[in-house]
Image (cartoon, rainbow, N blue to C red):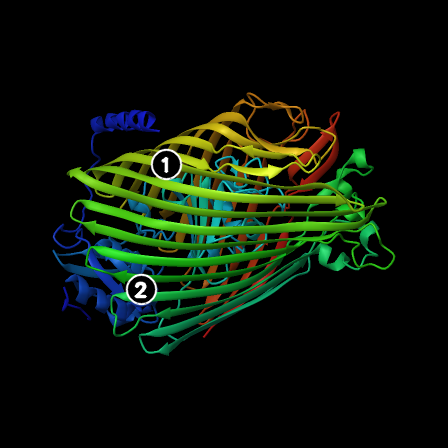
Amino acid sequence: MNSGVSGRNGLKRLAAGVAVAALMCGLAPLGAVAQPAESVAAVPVSLSIAPQSLDGALTALADQANLQILFTSDEVAGLSTGGLSGSYTASEALATLLAGTGLTYEFTGANVVALRRVAEVGGTTTLPSLVVYGAKNTTTLEDTTASVGIVTAEEIEDHQIQSFRGAFRMMGNVMDGDWPDAGFVIRGVNSEGLTPGGAPLASLYIDGAQQTVMGARRGARGLWDVEQVEVYRGPQSTLTGRAALAGAVYVKTKDPTFDWEAKGKATIGTMDTRGTAFMVNAPLVEDQLAMRVSAEYNISENDINYPAYTGFDRYDEFVENEYYNIRGKLLLLPNGMPDTSALLTYSFSHDSPYSDDIAGPVLGFPLDADRGDFNLPVFAESRTTEVNNVSFEVKHDLTSSLLLTSLTSFSRSDMERPSINEGTAGETNVLSGGDDRSILTQEFRVNYEAGRWKAVAGIYLADEEMNSGYVRPDYFGNFDVSRASTDSSNAALFGEATYEFIPTWKVVAGGRLDYTDQESTNFFSRNGAVTTNQSSSFEETVFLPKAGLIKELAPEHTLGFTVQQGFRNGGSGVQTSSGTPFTYDPEETWNYEVSYKGAFFDRRLQLSANAFYTDWKDQQVEILQNPLDFTSGIIVNAASSELYGFEIEGRYAVTPELSTFVSLGHVQSEFENFSSVSTGNLSGMPFPEAPEWSFALGAFYESDTGFFFGGDTKYTSSYMTRIDGAPQEDVDAYWVSNAQAGYKMDGWKVTVFAENLFDERYYTYIDTAGGVPVAATLGPRQLVGVSLEVEF
C-alpha cells in the first residue's frame, strides 16, 4: 500500500435578467449526497504536477495538498496522467489526474483518500468528473453554467470518430454544415452566420490557437492522439471575444508525459479508404523536458459520378478526400522554477475534402444517377488548404491563489482553388486562385481562487490578415482579375468573478471591453479595364456584460441562471459590380440561460441540462441587390430574430462493462423581420440549417475476455436549407447510425466499424424549381472498414 503525506504547504436588461434569477430562491434542495470534509477537499491550493506516471503524480499531489492517498501499486501500474498546474481543490485535482484511468476516489477522512477501480465503489460503476479545457474560469464540467458538449479520448477511440465534425454526432443542437465550404452549426446558427467567409459567429480552437475561417473549413480536423473535443453552445463573448456570439469549438490534443510511449494504427475500408497514424512520446530530460510527436494520413475516393471530368489533369485530386497532419509538442518543467510550466505546440495539416453536390432533373439527370459533373469545368474547383498552427502557453503559480497564464498563438491557412480543368492542355476557360489568411493572438490571463472568491481577468490582442484573389484568363472571352484583402486588429479587456455571498449561493458578474479596427481593399478588372479599386475602413468599441446566479441545491447538484450579451463586430467592404464601398453595423444578442448539472446513483449517472432564449438584433445578412448578378452582393443589417430551446445530455455507467450516453436538443428559430429583393420575405421563417429536434444515443460494451462492441445513432429533424431565391426548400429528417466491434489484448486491438451502418440516403441541401430538383448535396454514404492499433 502506497500513501503520501504533504511536505509543502445593456444594463437595464442585465438587471432585469438578474431579477428573474431571484425566483430560484424558492427552490427546495435535493436529497443529501455524501461529500468530503470541507477542511481539505473544498479548499483551493496551488498545485504544480508534471505529466508523468499516475503513481508519481498522486505522490506529488499528496505532498502538495496535505493528503494521504491510499492505493496499491497494481491499481496504478502502467497508467499515466497529463499533470496539472494552478489553483485546484483536492476534489478537482483528483478528478483531473484520474480522468480516463478507470479509477475514482473516496474521502474516508478529513484528509484521507482511498482510490478504487471504477467497478469497486459500492460494488457498482461510477463516473469520474469531466475535465474541461476550453473554459477559462473553471476546470470541471460541474463548475460551469455553460452548455458544453464533450467527447472524451476514450469515446473517440471506442466509437472510431475520425474528425472533430464527426464528434457532433454525439451532441444535441450541434451538426456539421451542408458542404465543405460552410461552417458548423450550433443551436441552429451556422458558425459563419449569413455572411459566408466573413468574421465567424463561432470559432474553432486547436490547442488554444484560433483557426481562420478557411482553416476551420479545411484544416486540422483529425482526432488521432486527441484528448477531448468540447463544443460550447451559446454566446461566449465575455471570455472568448468577438468570434463567439454563437459558441466555440475546442480541440485539445494530448500533452507530452515523462514516460516512453509509442502507438501506431492502420485502416482500410470501402470507398478505397486507406489510413495510417503513429505517436511517439519521449522524456528528454528527466522530469523536466518531454516531447510528443504524432501524425496521421487518410485518403478515400468519392463514389459520385463525373464522366465529363475524367479527362482533366486534376480529376484525381478532385475526387479524393486526402488529409494528413503532423504535430509536435514540447513540455518544459524547469527544476529551478517549480511553479512554472511551458508548452510549445506546432502542427501542419493538408486537407482536401471532396464535394457531394449532385444534379437533379432540371439539369438533365435524376438525383439517383449521382452525377456531379453538372457545372462547366471553370466552376468546378479543386480546393486544398494547408494550415500551420503554433501555440505557446506558459503558466506560473504566483501564489497559492494566483495563477498567471500567457498564451501566444499563430494560425495560417493557405487555400488553393484551381478549377478542375486548370493545367490541362488546350483548356483556356480556367480559374486559378487562392485565399491566404493568418491570425496572431496574445493573451495574458490571471486566475484567482481563495475563500468565497473565484475570478479570471485578462488582456487579449489579435491581428488578422486576409488576402484572396483569382485570375480567369479566358472567361467566355474576357480576362478577369480579382483581389481582396482585409487587415483587422482587436484588443480587449475581459473578466469574470464568482462570489459565494451566503452558503450554497453564488453571484456571477463579468464583462468584456472590446476594440476592433478593420481595413479592406477590393480590386476587379476585366480585359484590363479596372471596374473596382476601392478601400474602406471601420472601427468600433463595445462593452459586453454578463451576470448570473448559482444555487447549490445539494452536493453534486447545481442550478444556475445567466444573462449575457453577445456580438459580432461590424465591418466594411466594396460591392464588386459597382465598386461602391459599404459599411455595416455590429450585430448583437441578449442570451438568457438556465443551467443544471447533477450526478445520481453514486455518480453512475451524470446529467446536464440548459434552457435558453436569445434575442437577436441587427443581424448581418449578405444580399444581392440585383438577384441576377452574383457580383452585386453587399452585407446589411437586415434582420432581427429570436431563438429558444434546450439541451439535455447524460452519461450512464450501467455496469463496469457497459456505458451509455444520450443527448437531446431542441431549438425554435424565427426571423422576426427579414426581407430582401433576392430572398423574398423570410419574416416568420426559421433559420437555415436549424433543425428543431436532434437526438443522439449510444452504448459501448467491453468484456473481460477482450471482445467489445458499440454503436450510436442520431436523429435530425427536417430543416430549411440555405437561403436562396424564393421559395425556400426543406430537406427531410434522417437517422444515421454507426457501429463498432472488435477484440483487444495487451498491446494491440483490431476494430471493425461502419459509418452510416444502414446506408441511409439523405440530403443536407436541395434546390428546386417549380417543385422539381435542380441540385442537391448528399450526406456521407456508408463506410465499412477495419483498423489495427498497436501500442509499445
Left or right for 99, reference 448? right
Circle 1 packing at 10 Å, graded few (<14), some (14-19), many (20+), is: some
Q: CA distance from mark 1 to mark 2?
A: 36 Å
Q: In the image, residue 188 lies at what x, y percent?
A: 51, 35
Q: Amino acid at mark 1?
A: Phe
Q: In the image, residue 582 lies at what x, y percent?
A: 59, 34
- Residue 157 appears in view: no
Looking at the image, is mark 1 or mark 2 earlier in the sequence?
A: 2
Please name the residue that numbered disc 1 is placed on: 543
Along the line of sight, which residue is nearer the eye, 669 or 381? 381
Along the line of sight, which residue is nearer the eye, 287 or 461? 461
| Vertical placement of residue 675 versus 483, above or below | above
Could you tell me how many numbered marks the image carries? Answer: 2
Between disc 1 and disc 2, the foreground one is: 1
Residue depicted at x 76% and y 58%: 314
Please name the residue that numbered disc 2 is placed on: 83
> Quadrant of residue 551 in the image?
top left
Q: Amino acid at mark 2?
A: Gly
Along the line of sight, which residue is nearer the eye, 476 or 748? 476
Residue furthest out toward the bottom? 285
Residue depicted at x 34% and y 45%: 493
Q: In the image, residue 727 lies at what x, y percent?
A: 67, 24
| Vertical placement of residue 297 versus 504, above or below | below
